[in-house]
Image (tube, helix red, strand yellow):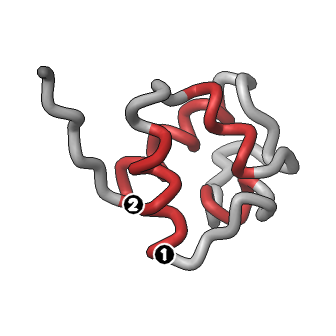
Amino acid sequence: MPKVRQRTIDEIQDEVRALVMRGRVGRQQRIYELSRHFSIRDWPKVERLLADHDYLLRDAVIDLVGHEVWLND
């Protein structure tokens, strides 16, 4: 049985930031909508990690991504 990779909150934030940058996820979408971008086996662990860091699944993705730097205004 393959071992499921352990992720950190920083890795999750980086993955979500990349999804936002590619336009696959909107900043105003809810965090629970990210479940379709993670495997069925990984999502419960991601969900638990988010809860451990006080993120609610009903929060907006921008709350998870946090501060963004714009190179061009």
Instruction: Count residues near mark 1 (Cα–Cα under 10 Å), then give few for <14, some for 14-19, many for 20+.
Output: few
Above/below status of 47 relative to 71: below
Location of residue 69 in the rendering, given as x and y in whole percent from the top left corner: 62, 56
Residue occupying image coordinates x 42% and y 62%: 49
Residue occupying image coordinates x 87% and y 50%: 28
Cα separation, mark 1 vs mark 2, equals 8 Å
Above/below status of 22 relative to 69: above
Placement of the N terminus among the 4 image quadrants: top left
**Which of the two labelled residues, at mark 1 and mark 2, occupies the earlier sequence position?**
2
Location of residue 67 in the rendering, given as x and y in whole percent from the top left corner: 63, 65
Q: Amino acid at mark 1?
A: His
Tag shown at residue 9: 2
**Residue that protrudes farthest toward the bottom in the picture:** 54
Q: Nearer the viewer, residue 56 or 44?
A: 44
| 1 and 2 marks in contact (CB < 8 Å) | yes
Q: Nearer the viewer, residue 52 or 23?
A: 52
**Residue that protrudes farthest toward the right in the picture:** 28
Location of residue 16 in the rendering, given as x and y in whole percent from the top left corner: 56, 41
Determine which residue is flagged by label 1: 53
Instruction: Count residues near mark 2 (Cα–Cα under 10 Å), then give few for <14, some for 14-19, many for 20+.
Output: some
Local secondary structure at mark 1 = loop
Location of residue 70 in the rendering, given as x and y in whole percent from the top left corner: 68, 50
Residue occupying image coordinates x 45% and y 45%: 14
Please state if 10 lies on the left or on the right of 13 as rendered.
Answer: left
Q: Amino acid at mark 2?
A: Ile
Local secondary structure at mark 2 = helix
